Image (spheres, helix red, strand yellow):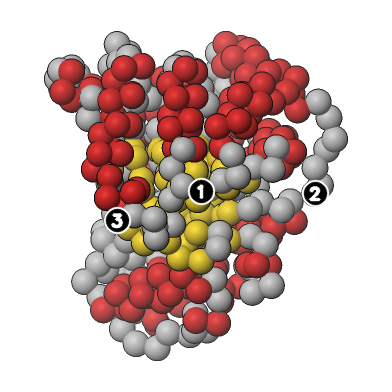
Amino acid sequence: MSLQDNNNDNDQNFMQKEIQEWLSSQDNFGKELWDELVYLRNRPLKKRKYNTQTQLNRPVAVFSKPERLKNGMGTEITLIFRSSACSWAKSKSGGCTMCGYWNDRAPESITGDNYWNQFQASLSKNESLLKDLTSKIVFKIFTSGSFCDPKEIPGEIQFRILKTLGEFSTIKEIVIESRPEYITKQILEQYKPFIGDKYFEIGVGLETSSDFIRMNLINKGFNFNSFLTATKLLHSFNFGIKAYILFKPPFINEYGAINDSFQTVRICIENKVDTISINPTNIQMHTLSSELEKVRQFRSPWLFSLLWLLKHSITNDELKQTRVICDPSAAGKERGVHNCNPYDSSNDYCLEILHKFVETQNTQVIPENFEGSCWNEYNFEILLGNQ
Ligand code: SF4
């Protein structure tokens, strides 16, 4: 598959319009799924009381930890905004089948000042790190939606945040995330002067290269071509693209998930994606995947499968062009990627290997076989095609 040469900005504007038209025309197709997703999302909201200015000025989370940068190891500062939630999740589609970000959403009344105060809180918390001239920082902003969507984060606040980050010499990389329909030529032109010579990357939840799986099993609402258009546009500005790959979407068994993610990694590499983030599905509250898990029709993937995927889907030479990262939520726990059970010692062993792989970007640190506790059980699961 190769990138098409066309007018990217018109394409993305067309895409936003097309998604809206498609949504309004879907009276029957997928209606039951959408109704179920909307029901699951709205259920917890009835109990929520969460409106004070103190709460709205406080992000969902701010943390720092070691992270692999483009040029070696450094530190990541992550800011998770308390936002009014993803436009796709708020639409009548109900959002994606595995996504529970909606659970942390703020009311629609949240203002630009609230976002700005949340951002300032993330800077204050990391003041010494940001001012230490030996620091090499990647600053990541997660919006649980799209940073570039002005209905989520007002445009003026987007620009102020990027301008402020651009002024720190210790910040080497800035990473935001967005659905592809909001990545337009117009917005990238506005971002460009603030970024300077820093590496700037937008993460897109591609999840899979299969349109069938993305549209029907994940309910993502955009196709692979939209992702490719965003990739080309970002590269034309010398910006990078990160593909989030969902390892094991709902309704897919372990073997199918390995195949799907393997294909997706290969296609991302062919299309010169700069960073691949492999995200093993974790079971988030009030999602369709959690409903499936309750009736034993779904489980998070095995760590053995994740390591197999990382070892076999990319070569060490390719890792010089495309960085592969993987920092699974709830790793080793029941609701996250784990082997036969959360208490088995193979979880810690596999996670140690995973961290080493991300740090070194060398597939040789991953063994071919894992003898011991869970290994035989795992091979049976795969042979039998179980969940
Ligand atoms: S996964 Fe992303 S696009 Fe899908 S509902 Fe969640 S925030 Fe929105």
x and y, in percent, of residue 148 in the image: 52, 26
At label 3, the amino acid type is: Ala
Which residue is the site of mark 2? 1
Q: Nearer the viewer, residue 80 or 269?
A: 80
The residue at 18%/18% (across/down) is 53
Q: Residue at x 69, y 58 (%)?
A: 269
Vertical arrangement, residue 140 with respect to residue 158, above or below: below
Viewer-side label of 1, 2: 1
The percent coordinates of residue 40 (x first, y second) are 31, 28
Q: Residue at x 29, y 31 (%)?
A: 120
Secondary structure category for the residue under label 2: loop
Is residue 132 positioned above or below 302 on the image? above
Q: Residue at x 74, y 51 (%)?
A: 271
Instruction: In this rendered view, identify the residue nearer to me: 160 or 144.
Output: 160
State whether residue 357 appears in this view. Answer: yes
**Residue 173: which numbered mark, if any?**
1
Q: Residue furthest bottom?
A: 371
Choose the circle earlier in sequence order: 3 or 2: 2
Query: Gap between marks 3 and 2, in whole Å?
Result: 34 Å
Residue 314: x and y, percent? 64, 68
Q: Nearer the viewer, mark 3 or mark 1?
A: 1
- SS type, badge 1: strand
Query: Between disc 1 and disc 2, whose residue precedes?
Result: 2
Left or right: where does residue 339 sit relative to residue 28?
A: left
Q: Which residue does the numbered mark 3 point to in the structure image?
A: 330
Indicate the quadrant containing the C terminus: top left, top right, bottom left or bottom right: bottom left
The kind of residue tagged 1 is Glu
Cα distance in 3D space between marks 1 and 2:
29 Å
Query: In the picture, residue 164 is in which quadrant?
Result: top left
Q: Nearer the viewer, residue 128 or 237?
A: 128
Crowdedness near tag 2: few (<14), some (14–19) or many (≥20) residues, C-alpha within 10 Å: few
